[in-house]
Image: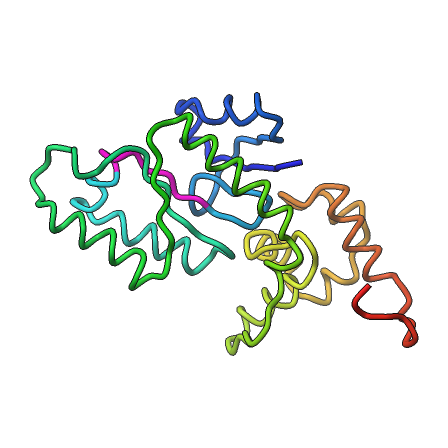
Amino acid sequence: MIEIQIDHREKQSGLPELLAENGCIVSITNLDIGDYLINNEITVERKTAQDFVASIIDGRLFKQVGGIKRKSQRPLVLIEGNPFSIASEISSESIRGALLSVQVIWYVPILHSKGIDHSKDILLTLGHQSIRYHNMLNMRHGYRPKRLKARQLYVLQGFSGIGPVLAAQLLAHYGTLRNVFQSSQEPMSEVKGIGKKRAGRICRLLDAEFNLGDNPQR
């Protein structure tokens, strides 16, 4: 089942209703970054073509892109409509430069949508693929954070279904990794975004006895 947390500012877009009608578990909340958080892994900053152009002019674009790049496990920008068709004070070259900067300098992918129905289809596809390839996506070969905060988040992101957002929620709630690991299922389930099922999976993993003879790949 696809779970999507949606920022309250997107409530009037019509997308939450479309996603719910297509079987997604939708919750309206206050997201610190992005507009849509899919399966606690993929953060989507959605912009209409007009808002994309406006965000270039007023300087919001790169602040928002920087935020999802730093704090999201898998960030992307979804542009709904054609920004080159918007009449504005900036040139096509400036729009093209912004598109290239987001993708090449910030390494944040951009997906283009023809309209709200197309956006719905894109978000659904992202949700299905994140579930299908969950184990592959969570392989962390080669990456070893150096800063203390990044190392703390990295430890918690080793748990299935825990991305940077939920890892930060757990640490903000408990204060230290030791406190997280010493918690039980019921109080952990009350942490924003965790819930009973996810808390149960974490606690079962923490409580499971290790058998040296078991195949670690199973």
Asked if residue 111 is positioned above or below residue 75 in the image, the reply reads above
Tell me the quarter of the picture where residue 207 sits: bottom right
Q: Position of residue 80 (x, y in %)?
A: 32, 34
Q: Position of residue 209 (x, y in %)?
A: 91, 67
Q: Which of 99 and 203 lies nearest the eye of the viewer?
A: 99
The residue range painted magenta reads: 44-51
- Residue drawn at point x = 84 percent, y = 55 percent: 204
Asked if residue 167 is positioned above or below residue 35 in the image, the reply reads below
Question: Is 128 colored magenta in this rendering?
Answer: no
How many marks on residues?
0
Q: In which quadrant will I find the C terminus?
A: bottom right
- Residue drawn at point x = 45 percent, y = 26 percent: 15
Q: In which quadrant will I find the N terminus?
A: top right
- Residue drawn at point x = 17 percent, y = 39 percent: 84
Q: Is residue 200 left or right of residue 91?
A: right
Main SS, magenta region, reads: strand
Q: Which of 34 and 95 lies nearest the eye of the viewer?
A: 95
- Residue drawn at point x = 16 percent, y = 45 percent: 57
Q: Position of residue 78 (x, y in %)?
A: 37, 41
Tell me the quarter of the picture where residue 55 sits: top left
